Amino acid sequence: MNPLEQPGIPVEEQLRSWSELNVEPFDKLDVDPYTRTRVILMNGSEVESILFSHQFARNTDNLEIRQALALSRRVEAQQQKAVNGLNPGDQTPLETTIGYEQVAVDLTAWLARHEPDPMLKQALDFALLEDFDHLYRYANLYELIDGKDATALTDHLTEITPGRPTAVEHRHPHDDVRGHFETHTVDPLSRLHVMTIVGAEQQTMNFYMNHGTDWIEPIARGLYSEIALIEEQHVTHYESLLDPLDSWLKQLVFHEYNEVYLYWSMLQNESDRRIAALWELHLDMELGQLAAAGELLRKFEGIDPAELLPPELPDTPLTFEPNKDYVRAVLAEQIDLRTDGLDYVDVSELTADHRSIEYRERVNAGGVPSEMVIDMNREHSGREYRDETEGDHPVADLVATDAGSGSS
């Protein structure tokens, strides 16, 4: 499909009533875990578009553009309400968090597996191991404070076991900034990948910033505070991959094209017919928004969007699926990888006075919540929680030593 040849629904016809936005939530225990992850991803994509549109509006004094942004942004806000409304009210913030981290693992792994640019693939692989570890920490918190098994939510589709330990993920801000792709030569698929992961990680950062105080338990509040800071690092890491030379109008077109790609992808894989109908509606709406953004680009910059966009969507839709073998391979090869400026290096290459080591020592002083939650759950449950469906951990130092470690 060439999105530029599909008119979709005109933007001015896209506004909906409250009753249309007040959708029926899914059942948190019966839902396909990957339907949950699709909902989370698309909510994050809508939030990213809304925030981008607001920033664009604050950086232009062109009344016609600001009015066009206001209209499309209102529609995006309605789309976000409908997508986010699929989450049930009895799904706790911690259960939503486990869904967020399942998104992070399987989305990042899938993008890395299909990424054509080695530089961008490395950026994805690097952060993948950190989000993988976050899922393990939150699963232990879930068992510790709620007495529940995270596989009731993940359905064994994503392993739950240590990644690069969260305690060593803390870096000096300068070591989170990456080099960017070149907008004129980047593979269109790579641009989609980077824009998708930026929106996903930004949503996770925002969620943890706002829900970290939902608990009475100090260990829960501490863990959210710690991982929220890592998620801010990840947003810095990923957003720095984008070429800043693209104009605001070009970025608008890229945002709308990315949303077309994502809704099209979700539609190809959705098992819930009711939710698939929402993906199809939103796809038609995004096609209309893409057409409107393209007209703005033509009028104010004299550029046809066909000059920027490929003639058709990628052959393979973005897919949520198990990535266990891939994650294990990256764990075995990159567990000791660190960043030093724009470079990735082995931990042995960092000197004791390296800025990131000094930074980590400062923030970890007085105890590390991500380590404390494992110790507390070992004491409470008699072992740490894991779900290692494919055998022992691929890194010898991280093989479970306590008997009966989690589910398997």
Image (cartoon, helix red, strand yellow):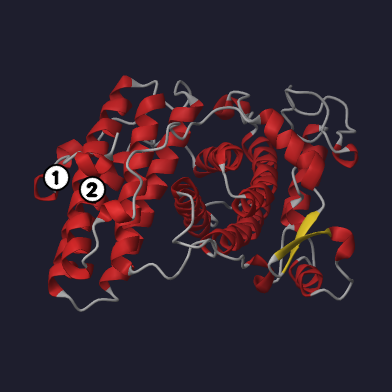
Residue at the disc numbered 1: 14
Picture residue at 72% right of the left edge, 55% below the top: 369
Question: In the image, is residue 158 above or below residue 231?
Answer: above
Q: Residue furthest left?
A: 13
Image quadrant where residue 307 sits: bottom left
Q: Quadrant of the N terminus?
A: top left
Residue count near mark 1 (Cα–Cα under 10 Å), binned few <14, some 14–19, many ≥20: many
Towards the viewer: 102 or 23: 102
Image quadrant where residue 107 sits: top right
Towards the viewer: 374 or 192: 192
Residue 41 picture location, percent across and down: 44, 42
Residue 102 picture location, percent across and down: 57, 37
In the rendered structure, which amino acid carries the disc numbered 1?
Answer: Gln
Q: How far is disc 2 from disc 1 in space, using C-alphas?
A: 9 Å
Residue 236 picture location, percent across and down: 56, 64
- In the image, 258: left or right of 7? right
Residue 350 picture location, percent across and down: 85, 67
Q: Quadrant of the C terminus?
A: top right
The disc at residue 3 is none
Image quadrant where residue 312 sits: top left
Residue count near mark 2 (Cα–Cα under 10 Å), binned few <14, some 14–19, many ≥20: many
Callout 2: helix, strand or loop?
A: helix
Residue at the disc numbered 2: 78
In the rendered structure, which amino acid carries the disc numbered 2?
Answer: Gln
Question: In the image, is residue 205 above or below residue 28?
Answer: below
Q: Is residue 159 visible?
A: no
Instruction: State if disc 1 and disc 2 touch (CB < 8 Å).
Output: yes
Towards the viewer: 306 or 313: 306
- In the image, 324: left or right of 311? right
